[in-house]
Structure formats: C-alpha cells, structure tokens
Amino acid sequence: MTTLAVYIAAAAGEIAGCFAFWAWLRLGKSPLWIAPGLLSLMAFAWLLTRVDADFAGRAYAAYGGVYIAASLLWLWIVESRAPDRWDLIGAAVCGVGAAIILLGPRNAVPQ
C-alpha cells in the first residue's frame, strides 16, 4: 500500500471516529455510536504505523495535510456543505507543506 493510500485510509478512520463522538455529543445520537467510533480511531492509529517514515513525528506532521483535505471532503460529501475558496486555499498550502515534510531530501546523518 502506498503512503498516500495509507494516509487516506487513516484520515477516513480518524474523521469517522471523531464524527461518531460528534454525533453522540452534539447531534444527540445514541451512545452506541461510541463503539464504531473507537474502532475507527484504533484503525487510524494502526494505519499511521504503516507509513514508511523514519520518525513518528514526521509521519504525523505529513499526515496533517492529508487530514485537512479529507476533512474538507467530509464537509462536502457527508455534511453537504461545499468548502469555500479559503478552505481550498488553506488545504492546498497544507498539502504542499505535507509533501515537503514527507518527500524532502534528508541528510544521512541526523541533525
């Protein structure tokens, strides 16, 4: 599985898991939403360990850009609210930042 595919799957797990708690606590849904929410969050955490990165912090930082883009897709598809231009500009900036973090050349000697 490619790094981007892992990040996309992790984002789906994190957003679905967090939304389950949102649905319970903010939308008045049943507390039974917690169970799938916890499973989704566990899948999210496990998926991030599958990323090919030397350090956890770097994997998490690069994931942030993917999470932002996926959150805006969730906004649009699940919550039926289209992102505005500022959402899209912000996501693009974060995506570039995530790519720099993940794909930037590294020195062989840690600094």
Image (spheres, grey):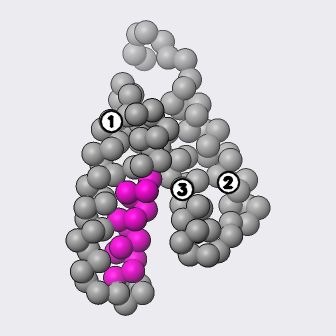
Residue 3 visible:
yes
| Residue 95 drawn at (x, y percent) | 61, 43
Q: Residues within 10 Å of mark 2 (few under 14, many from 20)?
A: few
- Determine the residue located farthest toward the top in the rendered image: 108
Horizontal placement of 2 versus 50: left or right?
A: right
The three-letter amino acid code for the residue at tag 3 is Ala
Q: CA distance from mark 1 to mark 3?
A: 19 Å
The answer to whether 27 is drawn above or below residue 101 in the figure is below
The answer to whether 91 is drawn above or below residue 72 in the figure is above
Q: Which mark is residue 90?
A: 2
Q: Quadrant of the C terminus?
A: top left
Helix, strand or loop for disc 3: helix
Residue 61 visible:
no
Q: CA distance from mark 1 to mark 2?
A: 27 Å
Q: Residue at x 36, y 25 (%)?
A: 54
- Magenta residues (range): 11-24
| Residue 62 drawn at (x, y percent) | 49, 39
Viewer-proximal residue among 96 and 13: 13
The residue tagged 3 is 70
Residue 68 falls in image quadrant: bottom right
Q: Which mark is residue 50?
A: 1
The answer to whether 86 is drawn above or below residue 62 in the figure is below
Q: Is residue 68 magenta?
A: no
